Image (spheres, helix red, strand yellow):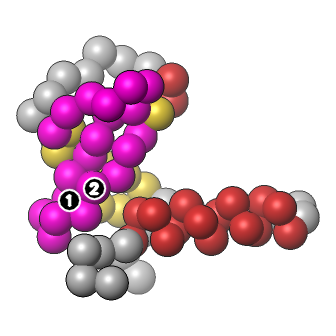
Amino acid sequence: MNNQEKGVIINQEGDSFIIKFNDGRELPWPKKNINWVIKEGEIVKVTVSPQVLENDFQEDQAKNLLKTIFQTNNA
């Protein structure tokens, strides 16, 4: 399973950068979680790695995040 994808910063919306992947998916990424100067057109890698979840709330948050990341316009 591929747990890393490249995307391009296409713009900024509010407190997030919007990352667009080759297949057209877009992912808002909070600016506060990026600790370097970033600009539109820059290529970034997004990595997903496992973490032990401590409760059902964390599991629900993780599932919702994955749905957001992997949703397509064909759904």
Q: Give the CA distance from mark 2 to mark 1.
A: 6 Å
Residue 7 can be seen in this image: no
What numbered label is drawn on residue 59?
none
In front of the other: 7 or 13: 13
Expressed as whole percent of the image width and height from the top left, the position of residue 73 reads 25, 74
Q: Which residue is mark 1?
A: 21
Indicate the quadrant containing the C terminus: top left, top right, bottom left or bottom right: bottom left
State the residue in front, 69 or 48.
69
Q: Position of residue 24 (x, y in %)?
A: 16, 65
Magenta stretch?
10-29
On the rendered structure, is 14 left or right of 24? right
Question: Is residue 61 visible from the viewing direction of this image?
Answer: yes
x and y, in percent, of residue 67 in the image: 49, 71
- Name the dominant secondary structure of the magenta segment: strand
Give the side of residue 9 with respect to residue 4, left or right: left
Q: Is residue 1 left or right of residue 74?
A: right
Report which residue position mark 2 lands on: 26
